[in-house]
Image (cartoon, rainbow, N blue to C red):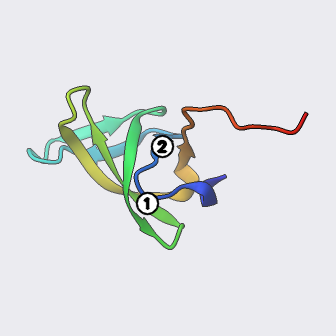
Amino acid sequence: MNSEIQMHDLVALLEDVAARHFTTGSPLMLRRGQIGTVVMTYDSSAFEVEFSDSQGRAFALMPVPAGKLMLLHDAPAAIAA
């Protein structure tokens, strides 16, 4: 599943992760299910993920191991009938 993750994909955290606010440095807790965008890959073993608010303002940017991410899909996959 994680080998499918690529640049600019939307992903969700599979567990809570401690982080720091992107600009203020204050501590944050990113919760399971938090959605982010992949902005860099590290040999498919980890991904740099940007987490943003509903206005598109980044509040966290951090490396996340592939095993802590789930790829999100916005369209169904076609199957043979």
Crowd around label 1: few <14 · some 14–19 · many ≥20 (10 Å)? many
Q: Residue at x 91, y 33 (%)?
A: 81
The residue sitting at the top extreme is: 54
Amino acid at pointer 1: Phe
- Helix or strand or loop: what does disc 1 sit on? strand
Mark earlier in primary sequence (1, 2) = 2
Q: Position of residue 62 (x, y in %)?
A: 31, 55
Query: Which residue occupies the extreme bottom position in the image?
Result: 43
Left or right of residue 44: residue 35: left
The reply to whether discs 1 and 2 touch (Cβ–Cβ < 8 Å) is yes
Closest to the observer, 8 or 47: 8
Asked which quadrant contains residue 73, the reply is: top right
Q: Who's the residue at 18% across and 43% down the image?
A: 21
Amino acid type for the residue under numbered disc 2:
Val
Percent from the top left, x then y, of residue 66?
54, 57
Quickly name the residue at label 2. Answer: 11
Q: Position of residue 41 (x, y in %)?
A: 43, 66
Label 1: which residue?
47
In the picture, measured across the screen, residue 63 lies left or right of residue 2, that is left
Q: Is residue 52 left or right of residue 30?
A: left
